Amino acid sequence: MMMDSILARIQATAPSRDTSLLQELIGAVRPQHANDLQQATNRLRALAHLLATRPDWAQALRDYLAEVIGQRKLVHLLTDTGVLQNQGFFGELWRRLNHKWLPPTVNDAYLKDVFGQVFNHQDDHEWVNGIEPAVWLDLLNALQLPPHGWLQGQVLGELLEAVQVLSYRISAIGLEPELVRIHPDIERFESPFLRQNAEVVQLTEAWRSRLVDAQAEVPDARHLDVLLSQCEEIIGRVRKTASVQGVSVSLTRLLLRLTQGIDRLRILLDLLEAPSLQEALPTALGLFRQLVEADNRKLSLVDLFQTNTELLALQVTEHAGRSGEHYVASSRAEWLSMMRSAAGAGFIVGFMATLKILMARLLLAPVGYAALYSLNYSLGFMLIHVLHFTVATKQPAMTAARIAAAIDEGQKKLDELAELVVKVLRSQFVAIVGNVALAMPTAFVIALAWQAAFGQHLTGAEKAQHLLHDIDPLHSLALPHAAIAGVCLFLSGLISGYYDNKAAYNDIAPRLRQLRWLRRLLGEQRLARVTDYIGRNLGALAGNFFFGIMLGTIGTLGFVLGLPIDIRHVTFSSANFAFALVGLDYQLTTEQWLLSLAGIVLIALTNLAVSFTLALMVALRSRRVSFVRGRALAGLVWQRFRLSPRSFFLPPREVEPG
């Protein structure tokens, strides 16, 4: 009944550019809930039925739409909506934030602005795209659009102008210095970005001649399609080169603008070349659905971050994935090497834990404690990396990216993925054992040596009880604090990948070798070795440095803000348990023994589970991979555990040749 009255009012009113009736009509079709596609489909079918049975209403609506569209500038809707503009990432971020609380002025002369008023619900794209295309085509057919000469007059002129605008933008982006630096062949050979523009100019001039002379010939657009394909090939090469030379947000934005511009140009050319209305309707419908979604999400901050950091996120996880290959032990020799490497890290952590206890004795402001703790953690973790040792909890952020890469490689067979998971779990187990197996004895020996040298315990009874309470999984916040440490581990993995990418993209090593004062200080050969090391390891060093800062400041931040936040790291927890054991003269109750040991195990599992889950989610998202066979993979891994639990902890026996 509402649609009847709206259509009757449209018929009774002279066609005008006022969009209020059109907004009412869309509101009558719009479902109560955007995800209720059945209701939206039924309403759209009802509208199509009304127009089919009442040709006078169809004629009135057709004239009304022609007036609404024909009296406004169409080109901006075709070239700007859904296509990134020439604005930096932070400028676009600031613009969207401003427009969220203070919307921009609506220019009634632009169809782009009016389009947003008609589809003014942010979830309109859900039902518009959810309705089957056949239902939309039935509605368009019910409107009885003229089959001949459907593309003419002002609409054709606006379409030609949009084609030219997009072509000029593609040419300009194709000559950007950042793009040329990554792919110098654009300058060495004739650029398809420039050639496509010459073809577009020729094509649009021929179409404008046809507006004057209907018999004028229009060149075939197939050659232009070949040039656009060559532009897309260059984009693909740039993406591949970026995996080696690094990438930035600005380069990602350039490639995204190019891709969006080429895609939109192809759609407009298809409309231009369509021989009849029936062949043009599917393309026009697809463009309409794109425009609705793009307009609904034009202020989305989530979309801005996802699209503009896509390549950067991929490269960050790619670098982590390549590092993750070194954290997966396949053979017995690699397993033993991992054990030795983890034991070395545990030895150093024992001294780091000692230094933290001594620092806690100083009388400092909270910021002073945070600075000293951060320095202790950062320098210690960086030393562990320089000595090629392994901290077990650093593995998940790397190995998760390795598993995501394996999933993305042509959807590997489940048994191969299951084997990779078993190797990862086995490597993780031996790394934890290596860390704890030496961190705890090292701390124990240090505590005994301190007692022998100074005649008192390194940790008094009160401090020892406090250390035991910190790892108690039942009577303290040990596990939530372990989860916070897991988040820090995950972030440190991202930071490592980011700086590895930065080192490659900004040519850090060659630029360091150009510093004259550094060459005079180190000499030519030593300079080459140092700069090569920095170029290869900048990400790992930066990740360890910032990880140390996070561990050192979070507890102080929680104290200053009055929040119960802190960190619990399994290796340091095991060392603290050894200090507490000596500090209490080994007088622990059975409950303290059980809770402390259980706390160390649960802290380890929480550290690993949180960091691994977050890293795997980001790695899969960066690759746009959704692994739907996760349950089947989990079942296969469980089956392997039941058949051979030993393989999850110990490497397979190696068979002698012959």
Image: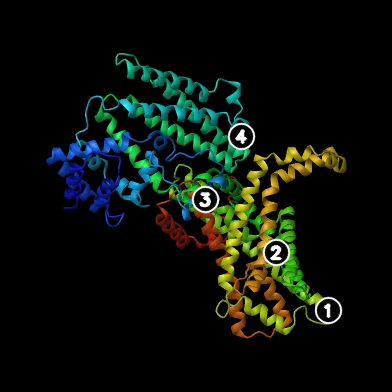
Label 3 with label 1: CB-CB less than 8 Å: no
Q: Residues within 10 Å of mark 2 (few under 14, many from 20)?
A: many
Q: Crowding at label 3, few (<14), some or many (≥20) Cα neighbours within 10 Å? A: many
Q: Nearer the viewer, residue 253 or 108?
A: 108
Q: Which residue is mark 1?
A: 452
303 vs 568, left or right, is left
Q: Is residue 43 above or below residue 240?
A: below
Q: Which residue is mark 2?
A: 346
Q: Secondary structure at mark 4?
A: helix
Residue 142 appearing in the image: no
Q: Position of residue 558 (x, y in %)?
A: 63, 71
First in sequence: mark 3 vs mark 2 = 2
Residue occupied by mark 4: 178
Q: Which mark is residue 619?
A: 3
- Residues at discs 1 and 4 in contact (Cβ within 8 Å): no
Task: Give, as a three-letter code, the residue at label 3.
Answer: Ala
Pick out the residue farthest to the front: 14
Asked if residue 606 shows in the view, the reply is yes
Residue 164 appears at what percent x and percent y?
Answer: 44, 26
Relative to 69, does residue 95 appear above or below in the rendering?
Answer: below
Viewer-closest of 329 and 633:
633
Q: Amino acid at mark 2?
A: Gly
Badge nearest the viewer, 1 or 4: 4
State the count of labels: 4
Tell me the element at label 2: helix
Query: In the image, is residue 298 above or below residue 565?
Result: above
Q: Earlier in the sequence, mark 3 or mark 1?
A: 1
Question: Residue at the spot x=47%, y=56% of the render?
Answer: 101
Q: Residues within 10 Å of mark 4 (few under 14, many from 20)?
A: some
State the separation of the CA atoms marked 4 and 3.
26 Å
Q: Sequence-wise, which precedes: disc 4 or disc 3?
A: 4
